[in-house]
Image: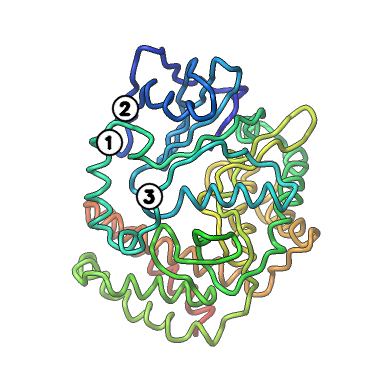
Amino acid sequence: EPVNQQLLMIPILMTLPSEYDWDMDRESYKISNEHLNSILHELGCTLQSYARLSNGSVVNGVYMISTNENRDFVLKVSHPWWNFCGKTFNEVMCLNFVRENTSIPVPKVAKYFAFPRDEAFVKNDHIRKKKRMETLKKKFDAGSYEWILMEKVVGEQLSISWGSLSWEERKVWIDLVISTLSQLKKWKYSQIGSFNEVSCKLVGIDHDSGLGPYSSWVDKVQTSVQRLINRDLSLFLRGSFYEFQPVLLKLIQELDNYAHPVDIVFSHKDIAPKNILINPDLKTITAILDWEWSGADTVDHDVEEMDNGCEESFTDSQDVSTEEQQEFVYQKWEEYGVSFRPGFEMRKNIFNQIASLCQCISKLEHGLPLSTAEIERQSLMHDLRTVLALYVG
């Protein structure tokens, strides 16, 4: 999340007598001076002012906090959908682990609150939705929402200048980002998943889906596909989704025969210019942000994350071809000792197609016009069959 006082954006400033409606998921709840002072009290601080960043995310609310003791903090409040899932504690644990074991710059955790992970809760969307609605009716306080209070890091989001940088200028930052994060890859694991609540050296279930831990990337794909197949068949029958099932079953049954083994390593899992704070004059990174989704994943996960083609991707320059940018990213990872090439394109294509399928089904679930979903379905079916024909015969 973006966290510094020099950001070139307009924060929504709060006056001390007021409370602020935080519109989240089309619901709202309030954050107040009283609640912030209750958090700051144990640190020997009192609130002077606070501001919510105007480009807050869907997942979290992020607030700049100034105190009368001249200590500045950032408060990151998690959306209640992820209460009891372990996401907040995972980020705290990762921040502390990275600070203690690497030279990667990260914010220092001053204080936090997180509910114990409840695996049954994570796996049941109905319970999660009900609990989320109950929480959203409450005002923010130190015990109803999960949150992390971090010491403020001075810097500028890389995303602020990213769009105006030439490809040659971007190469300097890409090199620096990869050289910094490559330190994570020395920690290897036997399973894919989120870190458990004991250590960043132990792996548990994925704290978003409730699935896993997975023995391999193939197990991850197969489990995700099986979950799709096991859903209410009416979803597949709508828009002729039924024809996906034999294709997906084929993927599950045959993927083992075409899989390349791949290392499982410590992965950030949300590498983007917006999550990197820099000193643009000194050409240094002052902090890597947003570790909530970090965990053990395939060695190429962070490689692919830098090449995901979304807004503010590391490979979206208009100066040179996408292929040239991708190859530069790949070569830099290899230069810093990260080997991922065998089977990379296969894993990337398979994961992208499964992710597209999940999104398509989700749109049907949320009531988009069937004609819209059908158009996407036809395109997706063609793409998925093409990928499967290449890799599973």
Foreground mark, 1 or 2, reads 2
Structure colour scheme: rainbow
Which is more toward the observer, 174 or 7?
7
Per the image, the residue denoted by label 2 is 30
Numbered circle sitting on residue 26:
1
Q: Position of residue 151 (x, y in %)?
A: 60, 32
Residue 12: quarter of image: top left
Question: In what element is the residue under mark 1?
Answer: loop
Neighbour class for label 1 at 10 Å: few (<14), some, many (≥20)? few
Per the image, the residue denoted by label 3 is 82
382 on left or right of 387: left
Residue at 43 percent of width and 66 percent of height: 354
Type of amino acid under label 3: Trp
Residue at 49 percent of width and 21 percent of height: 11
| Numbered marks: total | 3
Residue 264: quarter of image: bottom right
Type of amino acid under label 2: Lys
Neighbour class for label 2 at 10 Å: few (<14), some, many (≥20)? some
Q: CA distance from mark 3 to mark 1?
A: 16 Å
Foreground mark, 3 or 1, reads 3
Marks 1,2: beta carbons within 8 A: no
Q: Position of residue 38 (x, y in %)?
A: 42, 27
Q: CA distance from mark 3 to mark 2?
A: 18 Å
Question: In what element is the residue under mark 3?
Answer: helix
Which is more toward the observer, 149 or 165?
149
Residue at 41 percent of width and 74 percent of height: 223
Q: Position of residue 188 (x, y in %)?
A: 66, 68
Instruction: Please say if 255 is above or below 275.
Output: below
